[in-house]
Image (tube, rainbow, N blue to C red):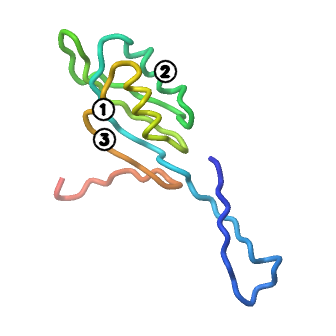
Amino acid sequence: MEVLKIQKMNFGTPKSKILEEKKVAKGLIRIVLDILKPHEPNIPYFAKYLSELEGVDGVNVTLMEIDKETENVKVTMQGNDLNFETINEAIKQYGGSIHSVDEVVAGKKLVEEVTTPQD
């Protein structure tokens, strides 16, 4: 994970202690997408292609529905600095389109969804 340096001013503190480093995630760490794509590229190739994008540590692709010309897939991507615009352009390059963004996680730590009584 890339670390950004944040300056914190402490008045009355000696100059040598003015700078304080803090780890901050630069972007998204997980995104779940509902994608409509043509049959080609096939799902294994599509997953490998997406996994090679900058900032991506891993990709899961699940086939949700298939018809004569297209496939509806759920794509889960995880990394330390996912760039939504780059991901969207990569999907378009292979003839796909994002139908919905179903989950987004940002920050330094992955927070799992919790089931509540309303669920």
Quadrant in which residue 70 is drawn = top left
Callouts 3 and 1 close, C-beta under 8 Å: yes
Q: Label 2 to label 3, Cα distance in Å?
A: 19 Å
> Disc 2 and disc 1: Cα gap in Å?
16 Å
Q: Residue at x 52, y 40 (%)?
A: 79
- CA neighbours of label 3 inside 10 A, class few (<14), some (14 to 19), many (20+): few
Q: Secondary structure at mark 3?
A: strand
Q: Nearer the viewer, residue 111 or 96?
A: 96
Q: Which residue is mark 3?
A: 101
Q: Position of residue 10 (x, y in %)?
A: 69, 83
Lateral position of residue 2 relative to residue 102, left or right: right
Label 3 to label 1, Cα distance in Å? 7 Å
Upstream in sequence: badge 2 or badge 1: 2
**Tag 3: residue type?**
Val
Q: Where is residue 4, by image quadrant? A: bottom right
Residue drawn at x 53%, y 34% is 56
**Secondary element type, mark 2:** helix
Q: Which mark is residue 98?
A: 1
Q: Residues within 10 Å of mark 2 (few under 14, many from 20)?
A: some
Asked if residue 14 lies left or right of residue 74, the reply is: right
Seen at 43% across and 38% down, the residue is 85
Q: Amino acid at mark 1?
A: Ile
The residue tagged 2 is 49
Look at the picture and state if 36 lies above or below 56. Answer: above
Image position, residue 21 (x, y; %): 69, 65
Q: Amino acid at mark 2?
A: Tyr
Camera-side residue of 105 and 9: 9
Does residue 91 sit above or below 104 in this rendering? above
Q: Report the side of 95 relative to 69 (left or right).
A: right
